[in-house]
Amino acid sequence: MTDYLLKMEFVLSNLWNLGSMRSSESWRTHRKILYNAFHPRVMPEYYADLRTGSIFLLRNIISSPENFVDHVSHYTATLALKLAYGYTELETNDNQYHVRLAHDMNDSLQSVVPGSFLVEYVPILRYLPGWFPGTSFKGKAVAWAVSINELKNKPWRRLKQAIDNGTSVPSFSTRNLEKFNVVITSGSEHTGMEEVIKCCAATIYGVGSDTTTSAIFTFILAMTLYIDVQKRAQDEIDRVVGTSRLPDFSDRDSLPFVNAVFSEVLRWNPVTPLGVSHRAREDDEYEGYSIPRNTTVVPNIWAALHDESLYGPNTMDFDPDRFLKHDVGKPLPPDPGNIAFGFGRRICPGRHLAESSLWITMTYLLATFNVAKEVDSQGQEVEPDVRYSEGLGSGPFPYKCRFIPRSSAAVKLVAN
């Protein structure tokens, strides 16, 4: 399927973010800037920010574990804003505002899932007033447009003010402004390259924060449900890393079971169950199927990651062992990251940053906490309600669990 999707181009082009632009010179410019910024060779430049952000997440959970949903959302929004614009902190209300903008951005991506709206089947609806039955898409489009433009413009205005005041710090935006010799101030007019950098920064913020949040929630849910898996991962960390420090990226190759847990998180409930829609630019044929020019093609990522011919039996279960070598001569299953982040030229350019962020957050949580099911007033464990949202982006519905520090030494380690 990957070879076929290499020939495709994205169907819709109404938004400014990279994932929704038509294949063009502008799209290639955006993609090149993001690809160069998050290439594997530059990942070590982001490690310090990823470590710092994860430490603050742990401290917040220690302080009020019942609010872990807010803490994870705060962590991903703050990290995305730090990387994109150099923001160093957010007040509570400001954070809630930015988290909402990121959610609105991803809600708007529902529009790229074929069949989401009746107007796709009855095009004449676009010409009818918004009160007419079947035209609810018009109101949603107006609301999404406001949020999306606010997401793109408000952080950029704040960055301009910081540059005016001499308080800006290095970030994706400032590095690329310098690289392309773009000078901006609060009163300056937009240039073509400024607009490109602004759109790329907003894509990092809007898409990156919400998808990372969903992946972390999936990991926490899996650890709540599969205590034996959690215990094995913790035992491996204790054996390899010890308890006098937290795991680090340099330990990654020495933690095979933790890495298997990471792969299973990507596979079990992918953040994007259906990949972004593509269209055939010419008549084609794939495994005997005729695909006429301009046909919409939707990669079913969820189905691929639950294919038992690829990942073995019981793909609905969370089983990291499927990624560990058991039989000599039998190949391991495909890397879920090669499917979960898209295909071909449309693959997510921030894949390596997203993977690094998820991996360090996972290992920090495993080293510090035991994650357990909630208990009721009678002391009985309460099973989490495992349900996921539908759409282009997917994440678990709210659930409850407990975060129990593994030791006083672990708490001190985080505090220091």
Image (cartoon, rainbow, N blue to C red):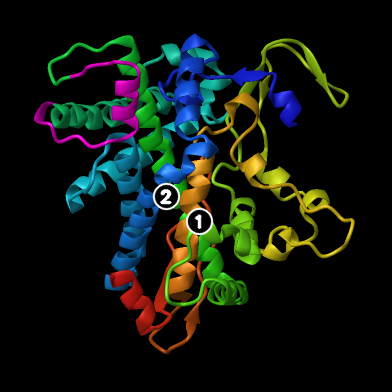
Q: In the figure, is residue 323 to the left or right of 42?
A: right
Q: Residue at x 57, y 30 (%)?
A: 276
Name the secondary structure under disc 1: helix
Residue 265 in view, yes or no: yes
Q: Name the residue under label 2.
A: 47
Label 2 sits on a secondary structure element that is helix
Kind of residue at disc 2:
Tyr
Mark 1 vs mark 2: which is more N-terminal?
A: 2
Which residue is located at x 69 percent, y 59 percent? 316
Determine crowd level at label 2: few under 14, some 14-19, many 20+ residues with C-alpha closer than 10 A. Answer: some
The image position of residue 31, as x and y in percent, is 49, 23
- Which residues are drawn in magenta? 164-184
Residue sitting at x 57%, y 72%: 240
Quadrant holding the C terminus: bottom left
Residue 255: x and y, percent?
Answer: 61, 64
**Vertical order, 363 against 6 (above or below):** below
* The label number, if any, that marks residue 369 in the structure image: none
Q: Which amino acid does label 1 sit on?
A: Phe
Query: What number is the disc on residue 249?
Result: 1
Residue 271 screen position, x and y as percent: 54, 46
Relative placement, left or right, of 91 versus 147 is left
Measured Cα–Cα span from mark 1 to mark 2:
8 Å
Q: Nearer the viewer, residue 195 or 410?
A: 410
In the rendered image, the vertical position of residue 60 relative to residue 198, given as above or below:
below
Horizontal placement of 111 versus 323: left or right? left
Are the two marked residues, 1 and 2, in contact with CB atoms closer than 8 angstroms? yes
